[in-house]
């Protein structure tokens, strides 16, 4: 015997029906719009960390360039003090844009993509001087670029 609440009467539509006659959409599970904003926040935090660490690496190179390995026959050979200043400037810019990204500035996504690409190129050129850290930073930069490129707020 069924209860009256479980079976609709002829003059009453089934409880799952909407005004269009279609069942309601399934609940949001793993949709892009659920996790993409989180990637942008994570990219902003990584940009802050990456920027501060790059600036500190630059300060190390300016203060004591004997800490780094020197490669005498490297094509892109620069003075380590010069590399240090480049790391300081790029690191500070990446950190500042990361802070603006966390504040929600729309221009910061595009600036973040450009600056992290510059950071990845800078670390590629600096590879012989500090190889392990350069590879780690390049990997972080690639992830940041990916996270900033996949987020499209107009599609959410």
Image: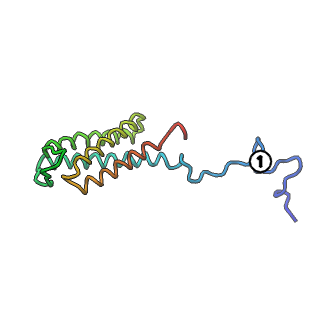
Question: In the figure, is residue 133 to the left or right of 35?
Answer: left
Give the camera-side residue of 97 and 126.
Answer: 126
Name the spot of residue 108 as percent of width and height, x first.
38, 37
Instruction: Please name the residue shown 15% across and 48% down the image.
Output: 61
Protein image colouring: rainbow
Give the camera-side residue of 40 and 104.
Answer: 40
As helix, strand or loop, the secondary structure at mark 1 comes to: loop
Question: In the figure, is residue 9 to the left or right of 19?
Answer: right
Question: In the figure, is residue 16 to the left or right of 42?
Answer: right
Instruction: Report crowding for label 1: few under 14, some 14 to 19, many 20 or more residues within 10 A (C-alpha).
Output: few
Name the spot of residue 76 as percent of width and height, x first.
19, 44
- So how many labels did they put on this image? 1
Q: Residue furthest bottom?
A: 1
Instruction: Please name the residue shown 28% across and 45% down the image.
Output: 51
Give the camera-side residue of 71 and 41.
Answer: 71
Question: In the figure, is residue 138 to the left or right of 58?
Answer: right
Name the spot of residue 93 as percent of width and height, x first.
28, 39
Q: Name above or below for residue 104 compared with residue 7.
A: above
Residue that carries the numbered disc 1 in the rendered image: 17
Q: Give the position of the C terminus as an image quadrant.
A: top right
Instruction: Please name the residue shown 75% across and 46% down the image.
Output: 22
Asked which quadrant contains residue 21, the reply is: top right
Q: Give the position of the N terminus as an image quadrant.
A: bottom right
């Amino acid at each position: 015997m069924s209860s009256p609440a479980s079976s609709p009467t002829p003059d009453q539509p089934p409880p799952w029906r909407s005004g269009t006659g279609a069942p309601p959409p399934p609940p949001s599970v793993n949709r892009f719009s659920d996790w993409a904003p989180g990637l942008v926040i994570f990219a902003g935090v990584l940009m802050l960390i990456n920027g501060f660490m790059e600036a500190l690496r630059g300060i190390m190179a300016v203060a004591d360039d004997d800490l780094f390995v020197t490669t005498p026959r490297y094509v892109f050979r620069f003075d380590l003090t010069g590399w240090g200043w480049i790391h300081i400037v790029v690191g500070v810019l990446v950190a500042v844009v990361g802070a603006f990204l966390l504040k929600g500035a729309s221009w910061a996504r595009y600036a973040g993509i450009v600056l992290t690409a510059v950071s990845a190129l800078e670390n590629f050129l600096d590879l012989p001087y500090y190889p392990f850290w350069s590879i780690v930073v390049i990997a972080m930069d690639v992830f940041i670029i990916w996270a900033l490129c996949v987020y499209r707020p107009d599609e959410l």
